[in-house]
Image (spheres, rainbow, N blue to C red):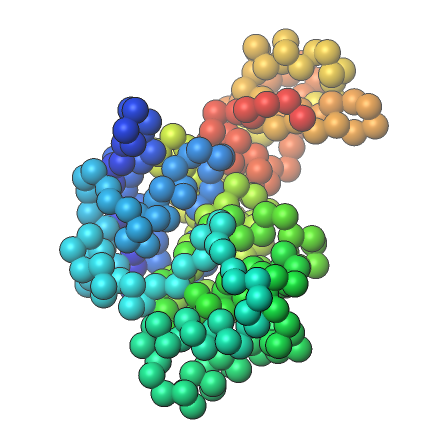
């Protein structure tokens, strides 16, 4: 099953274009949607989740017309937005049971079975009686996935899910998403390149509502191999190099600045061939870094 978007556009009052004639096919598996803040990612996710209207275009989930049959989409959708509220004085079992009832699981025995299985799967079983207000950031995100999995969804959308998580919780969360993504469409919307690199088999990069690149992360890296160069410079030289080259990333090391540039040919001037990574792909697609490191 694929999620297909054709010529999707959305402009907000005031003239801000969030989606600009975007066409994209998202297959079963983990799909990374990369872009800077304000790129249109959240607008796209809300539109797919039937939470807002688009101005024009088509969105199709398998044989379901997302724009015309919203109820059919919502029955097979699991959604974890960037900011989601929790009832702080309610425990996980009670909350998940309530959500399961709202999703049409009428049998108390069946709700109990579903809730217990999800708490085990998200590694929250030992905390099942704890009030949600006492959950850590990572626990909150895992609870968010648990509620999104109720109803055996065929499409799961997660928006900036690892922002603010410590490395251990981030790895745990990404491993959980990878497991889930084996049989359903999971869209991971993020600006964190490493998240996509680690768990996604396909990806797209968008900015200002436009599709800039799509494909397999490894293949995208290979496409710029031989066209990425690096050099160590003084920090006060950076403006000059930005003027003369397409600087795609910068980082500080022992007081010096290491720059990566994109060039079809050897730029000379002491540059050496670099081993590109997905961050280089990302910034190349965006046309260079947006700010100094």
Give the residue drawn at x 43%, y 74%. Answer: 98
In the rendered image of this protein, does residue 25 appear above or below residue 229? below
Give the residue drawn at x 37%, y 48%. Answer: 45
Q: Looking at the image, can residue 290 be seen?
A: yes
- Can you give x and y, in whole percent of width and height, for residue 91 in the image? 57, 72
Identify the image quadrant of the C terminus: top right
In the rendered image of this protein, does residue 283 appear above or below residue 269? below
Q: Is residue 12 left or right of residue 291?
A: left
- Can you give x and y, in whole percent of width and height, for residue 229 in the image? 62, 27
In the rendered image of this protein, does residue 135 appear above or below residue 124? above
Judged from this view, the residue extending furthest toward the bottom is 109
Q: Is residue 168 left or right of residue 109?
A: right
Give the residue drawn at x 23%, y 51%. Answer: 59
For residue 133, what is the image quadrant? bottom right
Q: Is residue 151 left or right of residue 268?
A: left
- Can you give x and y, in whole percent of width and height, for residue 70 in the image? 22, 59
For residue 61, what is the image quadrant? bottom left
Q: Looking at the image, can residue 171 be seen?
A: no
């Amino acid at each position: 099953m694929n999620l297909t978007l054709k010529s999707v556009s959305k402009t907000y009052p005031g003239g801000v274009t969030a989606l600009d004639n975007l066409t994209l096919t998202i297959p079963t598996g983990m799909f990374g949607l990369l872009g800077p803040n304000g790129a249109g990612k959240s607008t796209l996710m809300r539109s797919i989740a039937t939470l807002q209207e688009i101005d024009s275009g088509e969105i199709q989930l398998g044989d379901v017309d997302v724009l015309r049959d919203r109820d059919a989409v919502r029955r097979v959708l699991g959604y974890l937005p960037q900011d989601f509220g929790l009832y702080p004085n309610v425990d996980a079992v009670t909350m998940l049971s309530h959500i399961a009832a709202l999703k049409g699981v009428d049998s108390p025995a069946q709700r109990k079975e579903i809730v217990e299985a999800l708490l085990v799967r998200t590694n929250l079983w030992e905390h099942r009686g704890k009030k949600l207000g006492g959950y850590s950031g990572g626990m909150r995100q895992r609870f968010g996935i648990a509620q999104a999995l109720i109803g055996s969804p065929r499409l799961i959308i997660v928006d900036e899910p690892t922002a603010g998580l410590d490395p251990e919780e981030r790895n745990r969360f990404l491993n959980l998403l990878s497991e889930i993504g084996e049989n359903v469409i999971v869209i991971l919307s993020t600006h964190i390149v490493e998240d996509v690199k680690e768990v996604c088999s396909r990806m797209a990069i968008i900015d200002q509502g436009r599709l800039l690149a799509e494909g397999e992360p490894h293949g995208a890296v290979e496409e710029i191999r031989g066209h990425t160069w690096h050099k160590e410079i003084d920090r006060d030289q950076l403006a000059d190099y930005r003027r003369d080259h397409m600087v795609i990333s910068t980082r500080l090391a022992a007081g010096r600045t290491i720059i990566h540039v994109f060039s079809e040919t050897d730029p000379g001037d002491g540059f050496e061939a670099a081993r590109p990574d997905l961050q280089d792909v990302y910034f190349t697609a965006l046309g260079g870094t947006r700010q100094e490191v």
